[in-house]
Amino acid sequence: MKLNNIIFSEDGDVAYGKVSEFINADKFIKAVQEQHYQEICIVENIKIETCISTLEGIGADMITPLSSTDVVIENYFVADVSEIGIAGKEKE
């Protein structure tokens, strides 16, 4: 079974997954729930957005041709993630 890569924001309250890796939004939700560090979470406000990523980064206040960067442009599922505490109560 292939593990689809989910990327979480630093606070863990937003999840990202490449649209090309998932059959549909339900599969994305399932992967988020399986990979969330607390494991029990609510995934909502799912949308598809075109995102950019780079390992090298791009300098601020610069004009740089896209061809001279390592920028990758892809469509991602983006969703809000909230943890569920014990007995279904949200953590404070």
Image (cartoon, helix red, strand yellow):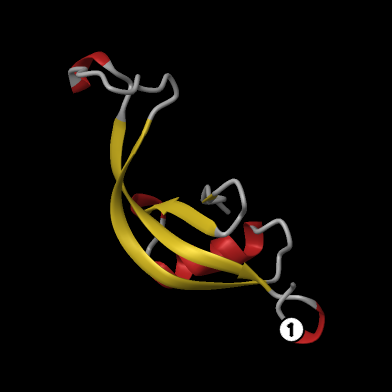
> In x, y percent, where is residue 54?
39, 28
Going by the picture, which residue comes out furthest to the right? Answer: 86
Q: Characterize the local packing of mark 1: few (<14), some (14-19) or many (20 or more) Cα atoms within 10 angstroms.
A: few
Question: Would you say 86 lies left or right of 38 here?
Answer: right
Q: Residue at x 53, y 51 (%)?
A: 6
In the rendered image, residue 45, in percent from the top left (x then y), is placed at 41, 72
Relative to 7, does residue 22 appear above or below in the rendering?
A: below
Q: Which residue is drawn at 24% across and 13% down?
A: 68
Does 60 sit left or right of 7 as displayed? left
Q: Residue furthest top?
A: 68
Q: How many labels does the image show?
A: 1
Residue 89 falls in which quadrant of the image? bottom right
Q: State which quadrant residue 24 falls in.
A: bottom left
Q: Measured from the top left, where is residue 1 in percent x and y?
A: 58, 54
* Mark 1, secondary structure of its residue: loop
Please, what is the three-letter code of the amino acid marked with disc 1?
Lys
Could you say where residue 74 lies in the image, as x and y percent from the top left? 29, 43
Q: In this rendering, is residue 22 above or below 46?
A: above
Residue position for label 1: 89
**Residue drawn at the location 51% of the way across and 68% of the way down:** 29
Q: Is residue 24 visible?
A: no
Which of the image's four quarters has the C terminus? bottom right
For the question of whether residue 70 can be seen, the reply is yes
Front residue of 35 and 58? 58
